[in-house]
């Protein structure tokens, strides 16, 4: 028998720059507000690793360190802005989320965070990709449904 955790339930909403993830967050705060009243909402974003290969290639391997540092800072700021946007959406519903940002492959980072943070429910948006596009590009929501160590709620946007 599984051991019950004490304290608040951990509900993690994974967000990216898409309208689908913002819709999933708004949907969660609207439709599950009463159910989640005694839960801690975790706002999670994962920023893929910055690929600097083209910068090094275009500068024959001698890219100025200032350029690299600037690109890395801008990349980090994009993730911070995403978390800030999600925090504003939460504030509209009177919710103060715990904010978590990781760097790496988003689908793997989400599932790793689920385990590390002891998440009880993961909520992700769906881009509504077709079968062919999912085959070649993969689907974060599909990956999480199959790999996350907790229940996963996939929120689709209306067609």
Image (cartoon, helix red, strand yellow):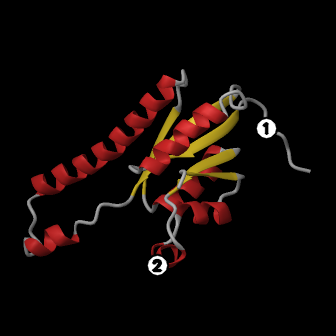
In this orientation, which residue lies closer to the viewer: 52 or 159?
A: 159
Name the residue at the top extreme: 94
What percent of the width, then of the height, locates residue 148?
A: 65, 58
Residue drawn at point x = 59 percent, y = 66 percent: 143
Left or right of 52, for residue 120:
right
Closer to us: 94 or 44: 94
Where on the picture, by quarter, is residue 38? top right
Q: Residue 136 carries which label?
A: 2
Above or below, comparing residue 92 to residue 18 in the picture: above
Which residue is at 65% across, 35% downward?
31
Disc marking residue 29: none
| Residue 19 drawn at (x, y percent) | 43, 48
Q: Name the residue under label 1.
A: 5
Secondary structure type for disc 1:
loop
Q: Which of marks 2 and 1 is nearer the N terminus?
A: 1
In the image, residue 55 above or below residue 15:
below
55 on left or right of 155: left
Residue 106 visible in the picture:
yes
SS for dot 2: helix
Residue at point 59%, 57% (across, down): 111
Q: Where residue 30 sits in the image (x, y, percent)?
A: 60, 32
Q: Position of residue 130 (x, y in %)?
A: 51, 71
Furthest-front residue in view?
Answer: 159
């Amino acid at each position: 028998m599984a051991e019950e955790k004490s304290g608040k339930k951990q509900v993690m909403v994974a967000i990216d720059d898409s309208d689908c993830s913002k819709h999933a967050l708004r949907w969660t705060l609207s439709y599950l507000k009463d159910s989640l009243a005694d839960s801690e909402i975790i706002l999670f974003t994962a920023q893929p690793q910055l690929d600097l290969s083209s910068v090094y290639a275009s500068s024959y391997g001698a890219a100025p360190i200032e350029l690299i540092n600037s690109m890395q800072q801008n990349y980090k700021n994009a993730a911070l802005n995403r978390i800030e946007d999600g925090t504003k959406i939460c504030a509209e519903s009177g919710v103060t989320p715990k904010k978590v940002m990781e760097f790496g492959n988003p689908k793997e980072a989400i599932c790793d965070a689920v385990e590390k943070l002891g998440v009880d429910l993961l909520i992700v948006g769906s881009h509504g990709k077709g079968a062919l596009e999912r085959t070649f590009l993969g689907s974060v929501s599909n990956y999480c449904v199959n790999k996350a160590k907790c229940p996963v709620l996939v929120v689709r946007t209306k067609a």
